[in-house]
């Protein structure tokens, strides 16, 4: 039936060479760059010229009720309803992300991807506005499989309801749907050979559209002898100049997350502490920004600073440690007013604390973690090349902040080491003094991330921060607790938690607040030192790790984000390909954007 319909359609393709009347607001769009601009008095008329190269593809959307997005409706009209009919006979259920590609219907667009946006948010009366023939077709389809359709949409509805109960606005829910549709559509077109993609701007938020498309097209293939080339370009039928700025912002955010993915995906023999510093420095030099300063600290500097915990972890490896500092000076303000507590006294003369200008981000940078003397099982040990993803996320977020030229000052701190077993490695039972002066008993050498973070967090206080946030692939326990859906978040500030939540909702990334109580600290009492680096108890491993870090933080606005569970994607998603994820980058950038608006 499909073949007959398509052949009948192609047989009447003379309609493709008729003139096309288009709206003024898209007459200069990249989508119509292949059209001539011959106009008659009082109208915008464009006629088809010679077909352009056959690598073109266009993405349009369709809602569960059958309504096409703006450009989809226009292309559907040009093809005498082929897009609509193809969707109706494809047995789609109206679920978010369902898609198909219509081939050969237009010479200038040999590939038209149609992807479902889910429920139509415009009104409940949209059904009444549809053509009678379309309504009848939908009713027949619904009568054929009413129960199956409802069952398959149940989880989608439940997830959306759960998001709303968590305080995620409908606008942010739609923004994430746009990312999903953009990602699926881009991969569909790429899979059908398109190298130039054009997106319908009415698919949704332009920034989200750019994020979804550019995130989905990332593929780690730099080490293959013949890497496949990415699509040459993506364009959108911008209706307003402000949309171009949103698209650029989305590209920057997606490229930053892809930067974190790339750093974490590269094998550890090609991403040592030295190479990490060199790679990141080169990436920042491409910005040619006078606001960025980079300092690569060597082992001598680390020793002089008294970062003995960093030294201790690194001493088992033949590769020396490094400490990378990135300073982005985007604000000339010395201080800013940021709420210091969610429970400020009502009789205080100032409910907000005058805090120094720097947002300080700390990232765990273990470029390979064998576990040391407490060696890990061999199965999947290769994944530990990504144990520096905290550092990768932090430097990539600052790269995006600098690219966006946000008016805020940020300091990124990343201690970089390998954790290896050898005759010089630290051993269970050793006691090491930290930069703070607290002594730490080493019970488990595979609990090394918290050791290097302890020194880095203490050092972070020297930059007069208004906020300190550390990110680390710290514990397997957080993966057990939350899986790959949420990042575990610990903080001593409810105000900071609210700020992160707001930023994460906009970015479409998920964080879950975890408990941070003195009870977990008591589990790490040592008989020979101030604290032991791992609890002897099996339970609450992520919570005890966070409690350990808190011992080295005196600031009232600190947050620890354990990204061990979300570091890797096991399968291809809409815009999350299999591999290291780089998740949390976009949330950190949105958080910084929010702070920068307070500074302005």
Image (cartoon, grey):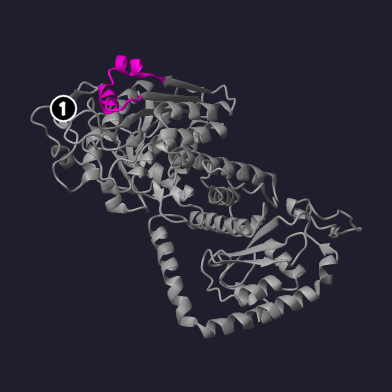
Q: Is residue 438 left or right of residue 327?
A: left
Quarter-of-image position of residue 157? bottom left
Q: Nearer the viewer, residue 317 or 309?
A: 317
Give the vertical position of 22 relative to 249 (above or below).
below
In the rendered structure, which segment of residues is drawn in magenta?
A: 297-319
Circle 1 sits on which residue? 430
Give the vertical position of 123 relative to 150 (above or below).
above
Residue at 54%, 81% in the rendered image: 142
Task: Report x, y in % for residue 241.
Answer: 69, 44
Quarter-of-image position of residue 554? top left
If the image is split into quadrants, where does the N terminus sit?
bottom right
Residue at 27%, 52% in the rendered image: 480
Q: In this orientation, does residue 333 appear? A: yes
Element marked by disc 1: loop
Q: Residues within 10 Å of mark 1 (few under 14, many from 20)?
A: some
Task: Report x, y in % for residue 526.
Answer: 11, 32
Task: Report x, y in % for residue 36.
Answer: 86, 54
Q: Residue furthest left?
A: 527
Give the vertical position of 180 relative to 316 (above or below).
below
Asked whether 367 falls inside the magenta stretch, the response is no
Q: Nearer the viewer, residue 55 or 305?
A: 55
Magenta stretch: helix, strand or loop mostly: helix
Give the vertical position of 521 relative to 147 (above or below).
above
């Amino acid at each position: 039936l499909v073949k007959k319909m398509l052949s009948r359609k192609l047989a009447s393709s003379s309609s493709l060479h008729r003139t096309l009347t288009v709206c003024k607001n898209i007459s200069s769009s990249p989508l119509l760059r292949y059209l001539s601009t011959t106009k008659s008095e009082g109208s915008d008329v464009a006629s088809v010229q010679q077909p352009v190269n056959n690598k073109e593809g266009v993405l349009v959307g369709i809602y569960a009720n059958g309504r096409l997005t703006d450009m989809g409706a226009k292309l559907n009209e040009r093809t005498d309803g082929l897009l609509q009919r193809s969707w109706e006979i494809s047995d789609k259920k109206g679920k978010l992300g369902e898609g198909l590609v219509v081939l050969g219907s237009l010479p200038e667009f040999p590939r038209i991807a149609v992807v479902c946006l889910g429920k139509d948010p415009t009104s409940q009366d949209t059904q009444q506005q549809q053509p009678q023939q379309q309504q009848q077709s939908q009713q027949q389809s619904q009568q054929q499989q009413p129960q199956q359709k409802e069952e398959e949409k149940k989880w989608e509805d439940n997830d959306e309801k759960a998001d709303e109960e968590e305080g995620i606005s409908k606008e942010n829910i739609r923004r994430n749907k746009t990312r999903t549709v953009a990602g699926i559509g881009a991969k569909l077109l790429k899979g059908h050979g398109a190298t130039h993609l054009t997106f319908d701007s009415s698919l949704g938020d332009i920034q989200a559209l750019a994020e979804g498309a550019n995130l989905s097209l990332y593929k780690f293939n730099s080490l293959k002898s013949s890497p496949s080339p990415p699509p040459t370009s993506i364009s959108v039928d911008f209706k307003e100049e402000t949309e171009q700025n949103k698209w650029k912002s989305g590209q920057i955010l997606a490229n930053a997350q892809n930067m974190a993915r790339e750093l974490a995906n590269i094998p550890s023999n090609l991403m040592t502490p030295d190479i990490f510093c060199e790679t990141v420095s080169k990436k920042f030099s491409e910005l040619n920004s006078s606001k960025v300063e980079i300092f690569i600290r060597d082992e001598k500097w680390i020793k002089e600073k008294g970062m003995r915990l960093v030294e201790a972890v690194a001493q088992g490896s033949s590769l020396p440690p490094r400490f990378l500092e990135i300073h982005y000076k985007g604000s000339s303000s010395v201080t800013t007013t940021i709420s210091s507590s969610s429970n400020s006294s009502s009789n205080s003369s100032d409910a907000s604390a005058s805090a120094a200008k720097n947002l300080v981000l700390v990232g765990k940078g273990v470029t390979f973690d064998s576990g040391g003397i407490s060696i890990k099982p061999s199965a999947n040990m290769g994944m530990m090349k990504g144990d520096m993803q905290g550092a990768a996320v932090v430097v990539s977020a600052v790269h995006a902040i600098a690219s966006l030229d946000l008016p805020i000052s940020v300091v990124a701190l990343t201690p970089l080491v390998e954790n290896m077993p050898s005759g010089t490695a630290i051993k269970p039972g050793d006691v090491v003094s930290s930069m703070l002066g607290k002594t730490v008993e080493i019970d488990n050498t595979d609990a090394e991330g918290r050791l290097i973070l302890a020194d880095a967090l203490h050092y972070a206080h020297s930059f007069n921060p208004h906020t300190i946030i550390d990110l680390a692939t710290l514990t397997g326990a957080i993966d057990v607790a939350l899986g790959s859906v949420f990042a575990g978040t610990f903080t001593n500030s409810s105000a900071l938690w609210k700020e992160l939540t707001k930023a994460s909702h906009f970015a479409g990334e998920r964080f879950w607040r975890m408990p941070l109580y003195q009870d977990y600290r008591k589990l790490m009492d040592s008989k020979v030192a101030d604290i032991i680096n791992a609890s002897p108890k099996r339970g609450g491993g992520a919570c005890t790790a966070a409690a350990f870090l808190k011992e080295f933080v005196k600031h009232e606005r600190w947050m620890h984000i354990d990204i061990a569970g979300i570091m890797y994607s096991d399968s291809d998603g809409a815009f999350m390909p299999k591999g290291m994820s780089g998740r949390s980058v976009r949330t950190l950038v949105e958080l910084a954007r929010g702070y920068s608006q307070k500074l302005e």
